[in-house]
Image: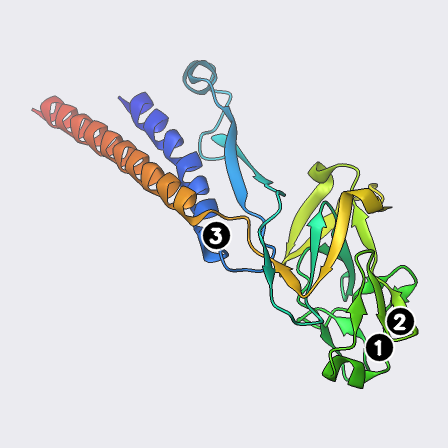
Amino acid sequence: MIKGIYTSALGLIPLQKRLEVIANNLANVNTTAFKRDDAFTNELISANTLFRDGSADPTQKDVSDQTYTDFSQGTLQQTNNPLDVALDGKGFFVVQTQDGVRLTRDGSFTLSSDGVLQTRDGAPVLGTGGPIRISDIQAIQQSKLVIDRDGTVKAGNEVYGQLRVVAPPNYGQVSKAGANLYTLDSGASLQDAPASSVTVRQGYLEGSNVNPIDEMVAMIQLQQDFQAGQKAVTSQDSSLNDVNQVGQV
């Protein structure tokens, strides 16, 4: 009976993890360039290990959950803002944060008071030669700033730099760092994205790749599975209580 309670309870843990992941996806359905996550159960402790050998503690090691990020591209949305930039294809912008170099797909850029191109959180956007500084603020005001498809930032005959766009050798080495930023695993190196694989689009932003209908359907199914698991635990606990009552008699 106790074995059945443990088995049912263990089955609830990955469901709860997936519910948390789906809830986070839905919360970011309107976040620029957000990439949805999913979770899967890597391993369940075998009943033989748990109940016969006694070599596993279900309170310490019950299931192994892992999440992964879906890096598929979201829909490009036209904004006509000269400082909004989207990547059409595989790759990331590079920004300099207080915690070091980070990657992002969010191209809703702004200018600092001294003309440095930056993210909305104030992290400088890196070009092939370092941070990009635009000295002609009037070019922005008069909509004369041009960001070419290769990332070259210019106004008239003045070139201010070229956005650095990189592509990791393995997307499995890319991890979310919060605030729509990503980090690269230690030991992995950044490589410039091939021009044939990505295009810079000025006046556009990439939308989230979350499909709210799919996420809602998955959440409803998970909630039903979770409720079924809870009922199984409650039912077995009630049966165990009845057995104890009989034993007392």
Query: In percent of the image, x 51 and y 32: which residue is there?
Result: 40
Query: In percent of the image, x 47 and y 30: which residue is there?
Result: 62
Q: Secondary structure at mark 3?
A: helix
Closer-to-camera residue (138/167): 138
Residue 29: x, y in percent? 49, 55
Query: In percent of the image, x 41 and y 18: which residue is there?
Result: 51
Pointer 2 or 1: first along the chain = 1
Residue 133: x, y in percent? 85, 75
The residue carrying mark 3 is: 24
Pointer 3 or 1: first along the chain = 3
The residue carrying mark 1 is: 134
Q: Amino acid at mark 1?
A: Ile
Q: Nearer the viewer, mark 3 or mark 1?
A: 1
Q: Are marks 2 and 1 in contact (CB under 8 Å)?
A: yes
**Is residue 193 something one can see in this rendering?**
no
Q: Nearer the viewer, mark 2 or mark 3?
A: 2
Q: Secondary structure at mark 1?
A: loop
Quadrant of the rendering where the C terminus is positioned? top left
Residue 178: x, y in percent? 62, 57
The residue carrying mark 2 is: 160
Tell whether 109 sits left or right of 132: left
Q: Amino acid at mark 3?
A: Asn
Closer-to-camera residue (163/240): 163
Q: Amino acid at mark 2?
A: Tyr
